[in-house]
Structure formats: C-alpha cells, structure tokens
Amino acid sequence: MKKILSIKSVQLGPLGLERLMYGRLVRLALLVWMVTGGLMGVVSCDHVSDAVKVSVDSLNMLACQQKYGSVKKAMRLTDEVLEKYADAGYQSGLHEAWLNRGDAYGMEMDYDSAQYCYKKVLKESNNDLICSVADVDMMSVCLMTSMSKEFYDYRSDALERFASVEEESGDMTEHQQEMWNAVQTEYHFVSLNYFMQMRQDEGVLEESEWLEEHQDMFAGDSTQMAAFLLIHALY
C-alpha cells in the first residue's frame, strides 16, 4: 500500500495525508512582516504612531518564531501585545497577535481555544486579508476535527475574501503581496490535504495542478516545496 508524507509532519498515512495540524508553516513567517494600512476594504487603516507599530510587530515576530520552539514563550509574547497595547488603536497588530495565539493553541491540539482566537478575528476585523488568513486557519481546524460542512463554509468564505483582495492587489506593498501569496498557497495545500483525506480524486487533481502552476509562490519555502515535490512524485 502506497504511503505519502503529511504536509504537517513526518508521520505517514495510507492513501492520503494523515489528519495532522498544518501549523501554517509558511504564512506565519510572512504574516509577522506585514505592513499595515493602505488598502481600502483589504487592509484597514490604523492611525497609530510608528513606534507602537514597530513594538507590536516586533513582539508578533518573536511570538511567531517562538511558537515552533516554545509555545509558552509564544503565549507570553502574545499576552504582552494584547495587554500592553490593548488601547493603542493598532487593531491589525492585535488581530495578528490573536492569530498567533490561535496557532500556539493549535500546536497543543487545543482546537477549541484555537477556534476562539480565529473566530474573534473574523468577528472583529474588517481587514479582508487578515480575515482570509483566519478563514484558512479555520479550514485547518475543521480538517482536524472532522467538521466537513464547516470546512466547506470557511473555504467558501475564504474564496469570497480572495476575490475582494484580488481587486486591490495591485496596490499592495511588497509585504502585503507576500502575505497574499502565502495565504493563497496555504489555502490550496489545506484543500489538497482535505481532498486526499476524503479520497476525492477530482479535488486532489485540481489542487495539485494549481500548486504545480504556482510553484513560484512558495518556491522560497523549503518545507512546502519538499511536501509538494513528494506529493507530486507519489500520488
């Protein structure tokens, strides 16, 4: 029986990817570099000082880095952002911290708490780019918790937000473009994982073809590229 490597870990699973936490390996590294402000309807404008933005972004970056080594340290850093800068008016930075916190919970397989964080962002944010990230995060949670209907709901929501973001993608900063590329690739990797799990060959083929045609969007990430090459060779 053929086995393939999961995108999320080194564990093997029969005839498809095992239900493991995707972890948002690529987009998280890019998300913390995001430059806020600018796009109407895509990235909300936060009228705060540059000093506050630098401090919050730095803490979010550290939290992103720490969650792969020490979830406790990542949690402390997100606590600092959410408590110290709660009234600073930098909503994009706060929502980024909530996404980081959700990821940390996910790595501990605490999917209820992860959902709380992602849903909080979806409820409070008017930033389509950040909300699309939360939608894809929820797709991963649904994949892990066998919520098939909800998976499709969040997948549909993500596609709708993608359409809105795409309309203004020409006005993005370089960092926003990196984030936009990353959330798209993660969407297709998570979708591929789901279709392989469900043994839906048509969906697997569609997602595999998209990834093959857009390798340039994740070529700089060795983890996703290795997963893609392995899937391409074995499926």
Image (spheres, rainbow, N blue to C red):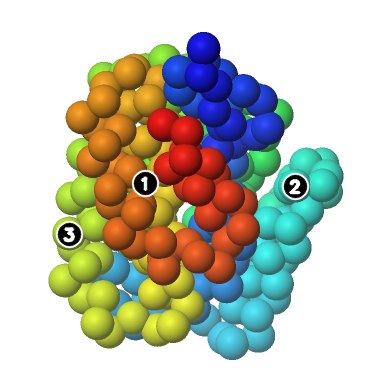
Residue 165 in the image, given as x and y percentages of width and height: 24, 66
Give the number of the disc on residue 128: none
Disc 1, SS: helix
Residue 107 in the image, given as x and y percentages of width and height: 67, 34
Give the number of the disc on residue 163: 3
| Disc 3: CA contacts within 10 A as few (<14), some (14-19) or many (>=20) | few
Kind of residue indicated by mark 3: Ala
User: Vertical placement of 48 versus 183: above or below?
Assistant: below
User: Vertical placement of 219 versus 72: above or below?
Assistant: below
| Disc 2: CA contacts within 10 A as few (<14), some (14-19) or many (>=20) | some
| Disc 1: CA contacts within 10 A as few (<14), some (14-19) or many (>=20) | many
18 vs 128, left or right, is right
Going from N to C along the chain, the mark reached first, 3 or 2, is: 2
User: Going 74% across and 47% down the picture, which residue do you hit?
Assistant: 67
Give the number of the disc on residue 68: 2
Disc 2, SS: loop
Q: Quadrant of residue 197?
A: top left
> Does residue 97 appear in the picture of this structure?
no
76 vs 5, left or right, is right
Residue 59 in the image, given as x and y percentages of width and height: 72, 66
User: Going 21% across and 29% down the picture, which residue do you hit?
Assistant: 202
User: Going 47% across and 40% down the picture, which residue do you hit?
Assistant: 233
Going from N to C along the chain, the mark reached first, 2 or 1, is: 2
Q: CA distance from mark 1 to mark 3?
A: 14 Å
Q: State the residue lying farthest toward the top.
A: 1
Q: Quadrant of residue 176?
A: bottom left
> Does residue 192 appear in the picture of this structure?
yes
Residue 185 in the image, given as x and y percentages of width and height: 40, 54
Give the number of the disc on residue 187: 1
Check contact, mark 1 vs mark 3: CB within 8 A.
no
Kind of residue indicated by mark 2: Tyr
User: Vertical placement of 43 versus 22: above or below?
Assistant: below
